[in-house]
Image (cartoon, helix red, strand yellow):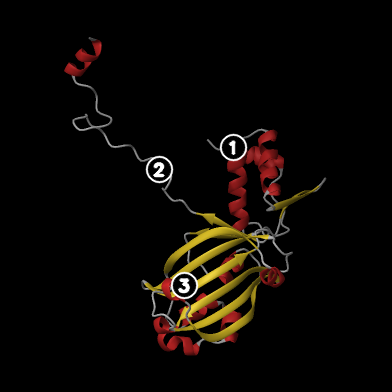
Amino acid sequence: MTAKYARIGAALATDISRGRYQPGERLPSESEIMVTWGVSRTTARGAIRELVNNRLAYTVQGIGTFAAEGPLMNVLPSATSFSQVVHEQWRKPGSRIITFEHVEADPETAHRLEMAPTGPLLHLERVLLADEVPVSLSDTFLSVAALGDVHERLTTDAISRDGLYRTLESHGASIDGGDQTISSIAADMRVATMLEVTNRTPLLLAVRVGRTRGIPVEYSKIFTRPDQAVWAINLGNALAVEEPPQPPGSPPRGSSPTTNDRTKDSE
């Protein structure tokens, strides 16, 4: 069972991520947590320590604890745009477009997008920003065949202003699902330069295929600084314990033994 201080810390972290406490705003004190949650001072102090350790809060001695501009949190499974995630956490989104060009698909990209080899793609590479700080390098390929004439209406101005997903949505090509894997990777010199970190800095790598009505449209590799963003996974009821199958002829689970069963048990 999760410790009580951790549960309180998680509840306060949720309040921070949802904007109930904006950056710099004072959080409940130890005494207020004690009264609200009916816990000891030690537990209240542990909850605050959880927030500080996770960089969601900072403490000013003699004054109190305040919400910090912690790392962005993106909850999975989700097809939420980067801009929306940043907006929801009271920060200013932005991007620097590095590449915007038409190219031919290589074998891997063609396979991912379920398209013909050497088919036409729109290649979009961006540095994604939060409050002007580089957070991710997004290397994206869009299927021209899947988008139809929508790809002709995509502009760097619109993507920089509104983000890729919202721009696609405005043209009737919403990314409404897909698949994504997340792993760790060391930044090479080029990626490190783009993200303003040192060479070989550990990064999170998300490899994503975005779909529109089941059709693969987007293939992206997203390199993210873990000091600026984290991925949270919504497990739903995935942690429910699945009971093993019963042997043939066994009584239903939860049923009481019959009289004969009790007699046999007593023999």
Q: Nearer the viewer, mark 3 or mark 2?
A: 3
Instruction: Please give the name of the residue rendered at 66% of the width and 71% of the height, measured from the top-left corner.
Output: 129
For disc 1, the marked residue is 4
For disc 3, the marked residue is 108
Q: Residue furthest left?
A: 260
Where is residue 257 drawn, in percent x and y? 23, 22
Q: Residue flagged by tag 2: what amino acid is it?
A: Ala
Instruction: Please give the name of the residue rendered at 48% of the width and 90% of the height, measured from the top-left corner.
Output: 152
Where is residue 131 drawn, in percent x and y? 70, 70
Q: Residue flagged by tag 1: what amino acid is it?
A: Lys
Q: Is residue 218 visible?
A: no
For disc 2, the marked residue is 240
Compute the Cα span from label 1 to label 2. Answer: 21 Å
Give the vertical position of 39 relative to 112 (above or below): above
The secondary element bearing badge 1 is classed as helix
Q: Residue furthest top?
A: 267
Q: Residue flagged by tag 3: what amino acid is it?
A: Glu
